[in-house]
Amino acid sequence: MTSPTHSLDPQVPMWLRVFSWFAVLWAFVLIWWGAAVTTTDVGLAVPDWPFSFGKVNPEGWWNIPALKLEHGHRLVASGLGVVVVFLFAFHWWRAEPKWRMIGELFGLLAVLAVNVYGVQKLTALLARSKGLKEQEMFDLAAQLDGSATKWWVLVTVTWVMVLAWLWRSWRYRGWSRLVKLGALALILVVVQAELGGLRVVMMSDGYGVMHGVLGQGFFCLLLVMAMLAEPTSLLVRDSAVRKLRVVSGLLVVLVLLQLVVGATIRHTQRQMLEATDILTTGGAFLPDWSNTQLVVIFLHKMGAIAAFIAAVVLASTAVKSMVHGMRGLSTHAGWLVVLFCAQIGLGVSVLYFHTHPKFEFWITQFHVVNGLLILAMSVSVTVRSWRAYGSTGELANR
């Protein structure tokens, strides 16, 4: 059954929809670049943050492969930050009086800048406390007074201000979904930058895992914004579409868990995998549960099987939705199965070619990017099915 629906977001002009997809593309390139940094293990090639060896652009960085990857990753990330600021500003500009919006935006950016400054000072001090002050890149830490208290206070106060502003704006200002998500994206891009800085300065794999996972989650946030900016016109209420929402949502959760486990493996076993056997893990079907690294690899294998089964169920459910004019959803779900088959093949290849560096780099890169495509396609099917069933649904075969 189809019927007219109301729009939860004001009609978005074509130029802003194109800009939204441009942000998605930029984020995709950034994730590829970040994956290359991790695959080649050059994440610590630049030891300070947010500058590189104390400079915006260190001399000759383009001619040094490690610096080209790590510093280039930072430049691309900075560019995405600027894109997100404008994306949020454009949506907000259309929602509120211009003078108020401009003043408030500059105030928000100022608070975020102070927060980043506080995190930089704090991480430099913490790095010195770990016995790293003798290294040249931590010279700035020697200028600190030896107490981290004031920097903790500064960082805490600024984050409380930002989060209070976000909560109030979401709850009381009547913003559309796109303005709300744009505000969230702006804050998350700062969080992501700070996690990257903590990973470098503190030399922490834990921060590296969080940085990698949040990066892919942030990509999905931009993807959802781009999809919500597209016009909608169809409302379908059918049990097949309702089931599609449930299965696609479950698949997104499974894929996200896979990304967390995969990121853990990439950051904690980036130099050598604990086990490279394909059908077993460490020579046995069930791993040695006292060996955390073997357990993580085993969970990644089992997670792949669970997610693949969910993708097959999703494709089967999507086929039933075709009779309601939602051919596009079944097409997307079918491509998901294809991507999963490719992903399993790439995963097996990573294990098989682990002793061949040239092959290993490209196979690992495509394994990461294909995983991102699986997540993006899963999110796409979920958003389209939820919009089609519950609010403003798009003609899914466009």
Image (cartoon, rainbow, N blue to C red):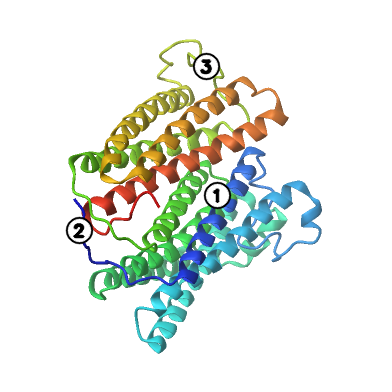
In the displayed structure image, the side of residue 366 where residue 149 appears, left or right: left
Mark pair 2, 3: CA separation: 51 Å
Tag 3's secondary structure? Answer: loop
Q: Could you say which disc has been placed on residue 278 in the image?
A: 3
Mark pair 1, 3: CA separation: 31 Å
Residue kind at label 2, given as amino acid type: Ser
Q: Are marks 1 and 2 in contact (CB under 8 Å)?
A: no
Give residue 197's position: percent from left, percent from top.
56, 55
Marks 1, 2: nearer the viewer: 2
CA neighbours of label 3 inside 10 A, class few (<14), some (14 to 19), many (20+): some
Mark 2 lies on residue: 3
Mark 1 lies on residue: 199
Tag 2's secondary structure? Answer: loop
In the displayed structure image, the side of residue 61 where residue 375 appears, left or right: left
Quarter of the image where one finds residue 368: top right
Query: Closest to the observer: 117 or 99?
Result: 99
In the displayed structure image, the side of residue 249 where residue 32 appears, left or right: right
Q: Residue at x 48, y 61 (%)?
A: 189
